[in-house]
Image (cartoon, rainbow, N blue to C red):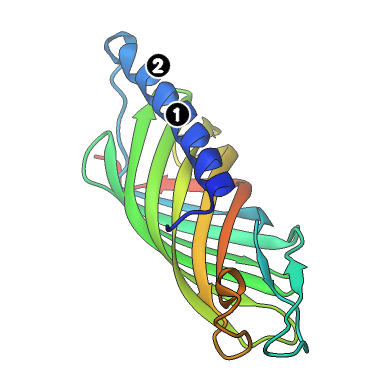
Amino acid sequence: MLFHPRTRSRLLIFSGFLLLFVLCLFSVVSLAQDTETPKYEIFVGYQWLHPGGTVPAPFQPFDAPSRLGLKDMPFGFGSAFTYNFHKYLGLEGDFGHNWDNYETTISTGPKLTYRTEEANYFLHTLLSYNRLNVDGLPNSNGLGALLGGGMDLKITQMFWLRLFQADCVWARHNYADVVSSSFPDLRRATLGGVRLRTGLVWNFGYP
């Protein structure tokens, strides 16, 4: 089973809200004015992360580990680059990093955007490389995924404000070097967290 039951239920609820959000947006697409679409978008801003997982506590016996719940990471930044194939669909590359220990994600995948004259609404689903560092444990490189979306408000044609971005962040990490196979949930730790972002978006390459 790839997901912990609690994590899976959260993802299903979040996905349901996102799907409802998309349906509402595209149900009124015929009422929206035609807007120019930039070929490229660059986002840079602040990132808060709730890792949402439990890992082995450092400096514990191999056959008798204790658990360490990962704390929120309020200090971080994010960036993203999107190439838009047309008005609604783009390919996104994403980088995120948080300190206090640290977690780093490098991700790519499709991005769906609904555009108006004053605001853009987007959804994306990305596959990720996830690197987790916890003091006292070996650095762990895992595979993961991101699912989320957000809203951008227009400042000028080139510069927009990312009012909010909210993503579910999932990853698997391997601690086989420090935990016995008798503890599979710690040996192969699963993260099911949330990250929030805000910042500036630079749109360029208009027709």
Q: Nearer the viewer, mark 2 or mark 1?
A: 1
Asked whether, in this view, residue 138 is left or right of residue 142, the answer is right
Image point 58% across, 68% down: which residue?
Answer: 185
Give the number of the disc on residue 24: 2
Q: Quadrant of residue 104?
A: bottom right
Asked whether, in this view, residue 141 is left or right of residue 73, the answer is left
Q: Amino acid at mark 2?
A: Cys
Whether residue 182 is situated above or below residue 41 in the rendered picture: below
Q: Quadrant of residue 161?
A: top right
Give how far across and how far down residue 18 sits, in percent.
Answer: 45, 30
Image point 53% across, 39% down: which residue?
Answer: 9
Q: Amino acid at mark 1?
A: Gly
**SS state under label 1:** helix
Whether residue 129 is situated above or below residue 1 in the rendered picture: below
Is any part of residue 200 visible from this angle? no
Give the number of the disc on residue 140: none
Q: Observer-nearest residue: 185 or 36? A: 185
Name the quarter where the N terminus is drawn. Answer: bottom left
Whether residue 138 is situated above or below residue 111 in the rendered picture: below
Give how far across and how far down residue 189 sits, in percent.
Answer: 57, 69
Label 2: how many residues lie within 10 Å, few (<14), some (14-19) or many (20+)? few
For this orientation, the residue located farthest to the top is: 31
Q: Observer-nearest residue: 181 or 100? A: 181
Residue marked by disc 1:
16
Image point 24% across, 39% down: which residue?
Answer: 207
